[in-house]
Image (cartoon, rainbow, N blue to C red):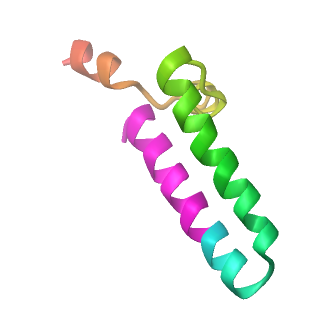
Amino acid sequence: MTVERSIMAMAGFFVTVTVLLSIYHNQNWLWFTGFVGVNLFQSSFTGFCPAAMIFKKIGIKTEAEKATAQ
């Protein structure tokens, strides 16, 4: 799995869980859903993504690194 796919998986997981929590627990969980969406949007323009930095530090490779390694 690459950093890019890991970010998509994590974002999808967070959105799904927080929507379910907002339905069954408290609607304030939708603020976290909004935060995930805004972070994905800003990272598409700036290239800054805290999750990507964490994934890289734990050793997950990017698509570019995997492509050049072969």
User: Percent x, y for residue 8?
Assistant: 44, 46
Name which residue lies at 66% across and 29% down: 50
Q: Quadrant of residue 62?
A: top left
User: Percent x, y for residue 35?
Assistant: 69, 46
Name which residue lies at 55% across and 15% down: 46
Q: Quadrant of residue 33?
A: bottom right
Q: Majority secondary structure of the magenta segment? A: helix
- Quadrant where the N terminus sits is top left
Q: Residue furthest top?
A: 68
Q: Camera-side residue: 56 or 32?
A: 32
Name which residue lies at 58% across and 45% down: 37
Magenta segment boundaries in residue numbering: 1-17
Q: Camera-side residue: 9 or 62?
A: 9
Q: Quadrant of residue 31?
A: bottom right
User: Percent x, y for residue 69?
Assistant: 26, 15
User: Percent x, y for residue 43?
Assistant: 55, 26
Q: Camera-side residue: 34 or 50?
A: 34
